[in-house]
Amino acid sequence: MKPSSILLMPAALLIAIPAWAGPPLICQQFEIGSAKSLPWKGGADWAGVDPSYNLANLSDDTLALLTPAMPVKVRMETLRRAGIYSAKDARLAGELTGRLLARALDTEAAGKPDPFAWFDAGYFVETIRQVTFIYRFNMLNPTERAAWQLRGDTARLDGYPWVQKAIRLGGVGMDYAISLITEYRAEDLKSAGTLAVSRR
């Protein structure tokens, strides 16, 4: 992420930026050790995508990884990576969002609402919200910017209530995610269309 880009952000957002700067669901890598996740080059680069990864497998691979046994922090890192990969193809973001939400709704219809399913759907939606900040607030070099497809120019779902629902359903270790989701959120809701879909 370009350090100079921080100077281009609206003042209202600058107030909320922590010391490491940048939208936390994207720019803050979560240490997961040897836990299995989506392919990643690692290192200090926040966008350490593996150029050899076949994006056509993104939805299937992500859903296969998000098992009930996966710790919350590993889920967060996996969804972070999925969001960054999705930035190259907006269709992928929509496909994965739809499948995650369908999985959550299936558990609801079966009478066994799953906190992890609701968490994954809500957290990914909010990750995509923050993916758009990377473009909207000019945090990319010209080459990256041209390839970035998630630009925040369409209405989006609201994943925050779904993560709250996951916590109400007994999801453990999810409170930290809430604090990261709320970074920049209020200002974004003022400046961009958001389609709220509430499942209580």
Image: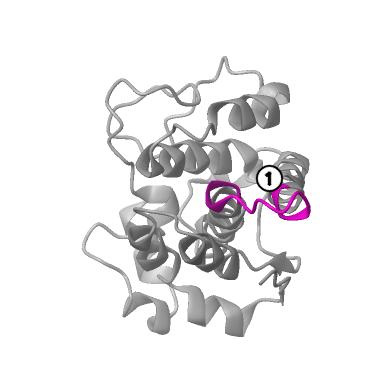
Q: Is residue 114 visible?
A: yes
User: As rendered, which of 61 and 132 lies closer to the eye?
Assistant: 61
Magenta stretch in the rendered image? 107-117
**Which residue is located at x 46 percent, y 26 percent?**
37
Within 10 Å of disc 1 (Cα), the crowding (few <14, some 14-19, many 20+) is many
From the viewer's perspective, tell me whether residue 167 is left or right of residue 51.
left
Using the rendered view, name the quadrant where residue 59 is placed.
top right
Residue 10, given in percent of the width and then of the height, sits at: 44, 79
Q: Nearer the viewer, residue 156 or 191?
A: 156
Secondary element at image label 1: helix
x and y percent of residue 170 in the render? 45, 58
Instruction: Determine the residue positioned at 69% across, 26% down.
Output: 60
x 66%, y 76%: residue: 192
> Label 1 belongs to which residue?
100
Q: Amino acid at mark 1?
A: Leu
Question: 187 or 108, which is in the foreground?
Answer: 108
Reply yes or no: does residue 111 show up in magenta.
yes
For the image shown, how many numbered marks are present on the structure? Answer: 1
Q: Is residue 155 above or below residue 84?
A: below
Q: Where is residue 140 shown, x and y percent of the image?
A: 48, 49
Q: Is residue 113 above or below residue 157?
A: above
Taking the image as shown, residue 200 lies to the left or right of residue 164, namely right
Front-lying residue, 18 or 105:
105
Outermost residue to the left: 19
